[in-house]
């Protein structure tokens, strides 16, 4: 679609400058989109593997607690775990992946995972709690990666829309407008040349 401008040489220079900037921006955005996509695909594979690993670990932990509960009884198991003494404080910072700010969880850990004495508890409870402590680290890692995947996907979609807007709207409009102005200027120049030739003919005749 033609832009609403006057077909002058000044406008032609201005539109050509806009076209160069738009073409440069289009290339940069395409490169950014492609790199974001590469990062996303690698991270998706990592998240997939992490999730499978976490699901396996969680299943093992649940089975351990169920076995402990069967040996100790529900009441004794609940009493053993009722007063946890391990505390995890999480602060969220950010890192930059190609202009996308993704979260980084920093943890401050205090206390012990096992909150009871060993006299009236089963070994399965101890093992399950130790596994759960390691499981929490994997869970934080998965949360980081999944949030990063979500943010990268959103940025890719936004970049894709901007690339398309430049590729299919702005750049074609600028090119069409440049062709139109060039044609109009050539027509004006030809008309001026014809008038000048007529004036010369008249001058010669007189």
Image (cartoon, grey):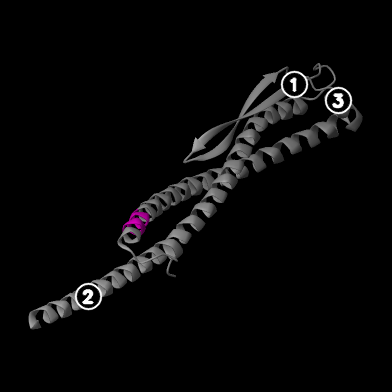
Whole-percent x, y for residue 139 in the image? 65, 35
Residue labelled with disc 2: 190
Ranked by sequence position, the earlier of labels 2 and 3 is: 3
Quick one: which residue is furthest to the front in this view? Answer: 206
Could you give the CA–CA distance between mark 3 and mark 1, rounded to whole angstroms? 12 Å
Q: Is residue 106 left or right of residue 74?
A: left
Of residues 186 and 20, the one drawn nearer to the viewer in this rendering: 186
Image quadrant where residue 157 sits: bottom right
Q: Is residue 187 above or below residue 32?
A: below
Q: Is residue 196 above or below residue 106?
A: below
Which mark is drawn over residue 82?
3
Residue labelled with disc 1: 86
Could you give the CA–CA distance between mark 2 and mark 1, rounded to whole angstroms? 87 Å
Question: What's the residue at 57%, 32% (across, down)?
Answer: 94
- Residue 15 lies within the magenta run: yes
Image quadrant where residue 104 sits: top right
Q: Main secondary structure of the magenta part?
A: helix
Question: What's the residue at 9%, 81% (across, down)?
Answer: 206
SS class of the residue under badge 2?
Answer: helix
**Which residues fall within the magenta stretch?**
13-20
């Amino acid at each position: 679609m033609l832009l609403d401008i006057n077909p002058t040489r000044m406008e032609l220079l201005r539109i050509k400058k806009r076209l160069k900037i738009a073409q440069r921006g289009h290339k940069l955005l395409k490169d950014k989109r492609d790199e974001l996509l590469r990062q996303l695909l690698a991270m998706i594979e990592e998240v997939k593997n992490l999730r499978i690993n976490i699901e396996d670990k969680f299943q093992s932990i649940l089975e351990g607690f169920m076995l402990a509960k069967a040996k100790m009884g529900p009441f004794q198991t609940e009493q053993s775990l009722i007063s946890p003494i391990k505390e995890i404080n999480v602060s969220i910072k950010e890192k930059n992946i190609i202009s996308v700010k993704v979260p980084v969880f920093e943890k401050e850990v205090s206390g012990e995972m096992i909150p009871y004495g060993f006299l009236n508890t089963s070994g399965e409870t101890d093992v399950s709690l130790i596994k759960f402590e390691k499981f929490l680290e994997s869970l934080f890692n998965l949360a980081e990666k999944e949030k990063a995947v979500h943010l990268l996907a959103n940025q890719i979609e936004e970049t894709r829309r901007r690339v398309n807007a430049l590729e299919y709207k702005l750049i074609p409009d600028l090119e069409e407008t440049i062709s139109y102005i060039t044609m109009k200027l050539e027509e004006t120049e030809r008309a001026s040349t014809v008038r000048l030739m007529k004036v010369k003919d008249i001058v010669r005749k007189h």
